[in-house]
Amino acid sequence: MSESQIRRATLRPIGVIRSELKERSRAPKQGYEDAPDAWLEIHPDFNDALHRLSVGDDIILLTWLHRAKRDVLQVHPRSDPRRRLAGVFATRSPDRPNPIGLHRVTIRKISGNRLRIGPIEVIDGTPVIDIKPVLSRVQDD
């Protein structure tokens, strides 16, 4: 792959999060910090990719943190100015050159192309770029 092809890499969202969280400032820093459940609406083109997902499965969502600042390279961890400044690659800050979010969630309900998942700390309208299963030491199939 050439350097120009790498620079033009594109992502296609596969779905979107529908959450009660509407403002970034009100979202928890992590899912385990009292984040609500939300709906993941999968684009109809990708319905077949949901085959064999089940209620109770733990999955990893990759999201595009669309309200992130992409020019930020250093932050105070957890937005706490008392903490030492750190490069964004050493933190979970949503502000970063490529604002990809990583979220481990549990599937609570499946309704057609909609998955009730949680807990998740992202805001309403966040694009989802991929879903991956959480792997156990022993995998069936």
Image (cartoon, helix red, strand yellow):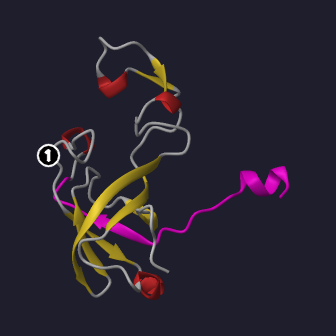
Q: Looking at the picture, how far across and down is residue 79, in whole percent?
A: 31, 25
In the orientation shown, which residue stands out farthest toward the right? 2
Q: Looking at the picture, how far across and down is residue 103, in whole percent?
A: 36, 53
Say which element carries label 1. loop
Q: Nearer the viewer, residue 140 or 123?
A: 140
Res 65 visible? no
Q: Is 18 contained in the magenta span?
A: yes
Pointer 1: residues within 10 angstroms few (<14), some, or many (20+)? few
For this view, does 113 lie left or right of residue 102? Answer: left
* Residue at 52% from the left image edge and 32% from the top image edge: 89
Q: Looking at the picture, how far across and down is residue 57, in whole percent?
A: 30, 70
* Residue at 34% from the left image edge and 14% from the top image edge: 83
Image quarter of the N terminus: bottom right
Q: Looking at the picture, how far across and down is residue 90, in whole percent?
A: 49, 28
Q: Amino acid at mark 1?
A: Asp
* Residue at 24% from the left image edge and 77% from the top image edge: 55
Q: Which residues are magenta?
A: 1-21
**According to the image, label 1 marks what residue?**
34
Q: Nearer the viewer, residue 133 or 66?
A: 133
In the orientation shown, which residue stands out farthest toward the front? 138
Rendered image quadrant of residue 98: top right
Position of 62 relative to 140 (above/below): above
Position of 68 relative to 128 (above/below): above
Q: Is 12 contained in the magenta span?
A: yes
Res 83 visible? yes
Rendered image quadrant of residue 108: bottom left
How many marks the image carries: the answer is: 1
